[in-house]
Image (cartoon, rainbow, N blue to C red):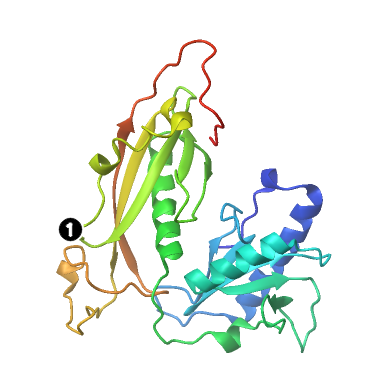
Amino acid sequence: MAYQCYPDKWSSVQLAAIELAGKTIQQLADKWLTTPEGQEVPNFRWLETRYQILFAHMIFIYKNKVFAVYVDLDGAMPVAHANRLREAAERWDLVPCVFSGQISGRFNPWGLWHLVTQRPVDPRRMADDTPAEMSQWERRALSIDIAVDVLKKEGYEIDSFCTIPEIDPQVVFKDREGRICWCLVREWIGDDPAAPSAEDFRTFADDRPPMQVRDGYFIGVSIASLEPVVRDRAGEIIPLDRRFKAHDYPLYRSVMMGVEPCGPTLIHRRITLPPGAKTGYDPL
C-alpha cells in the first residue's frame, strides 16, 4: 500500500510535516526496500498512516521489524508523547522513530532517529529474514482493518477507530439512519476454543452509561497463516487444511495471512433516556 494521508485530522502545518515524512520514507522504500520477484508479501508496507493509534503518526514494516514514526520537525515533541511512544515500542516490539527532517545523504538519508538511542535509523541495517512473531497490537490492527472493511460493505460510514488493544470500543460508525454506533472487535488464531463471541459481550454496556444510548455491535476475526510450512509451538507441521482449525501456533510478521470475519452482530440496543437525563462524558 502506498503512503496515504488524511488531511481532515491535522492542521495545515501538521499535514505538511506528515506528508514530508511519508513521502520521504515512501521514496526511499521504492528505491531500496524492494521485494524479490514472485514473493507474495512485500518486504515493505505501511501498517498505519491515519493517526488513529495515539502513539505515532505512521507505522511501516520492513521484513521482521516494525517502525513507529512520530513526526517532529521543530524538536518540540511533548514528554508525554515521547513516553507513550517508548512504552508502546517496549510492549509491542516496535522501533520507536522520530522524523526530524534532518536528512543527510550519507549519514541519515531517512531522516529517522531512534527515540531512545538518538542514533540514525536505517531499516536496511536493522531488519532481516529472521522470523519475528506478530505483536498483540499488530494482530489487533489487522483485525480492525478487516472489521472496517466489513462495516463499509454493510453500507455504514466509519467515523473513527483505535488500534490500542486496551481501548474499547474499537470502531465508531454511523448506521444507515445516520445514528452513531460502536463496535467491539476481537481476534484470535485459527479455531481457538477460548475465542470470544458476541454472547460474551451482551452485558458490555451495562456499566457504561454513555454507550447505553447507542447501538453496539461485535465483529470477530479469525486469523491463520497461509505460509507453505507452518509449525506449532511443539515443532509439528500444521497442514494447510488445518490452519483455521488449529490455534496453538505463532503468527509471524511478513507472511501470508488468511482471515475469516464474523459479524457485525448486534450486542446492545440503544436505550432512550428521559428528557434531561445525563449519561456523563460521552467518548463517542
- Snapshot quadrant of residue 198: top left
Mark 1 residue crowding within 10 angstroms, few (<14) / some (14–19) / many (20+): few
Callout 1, which amino acid?
Answer: Pro
Which residue has dot 1 on it? Answer: 193
Q: Residue furthest right?
A: 74
Residue drawn where x is 77% and y is 60% of the image:
17
- Residue at the image point whose x is 49% and y is 70% from the top: 91
Seen in the picture, residue 41 relative to 109 is either above or below; the reply is: above
Residue 22 seen: no
- Secondary element under disc 1, as helix, strand or loop, is loop
Task: Identify which residue, 247 or 273, lies in the foreground.
Answer: 273
Residue 223 spot, x, y in % from top left? 30, 61
* Residue at 16% over, 63% down: 245
In the image, farthest residue toward the top: 275
72 relative position to 160: left or right:
right
Q: Position of residue 255 (x, y in %)?
A: 37, 74
The spot of residue 52 in percent (x, y) is 57, 52
Residue at 63% in and 61% down: 56
Task: Determine whether 81 is above or below 207 in the image.
Answer: below
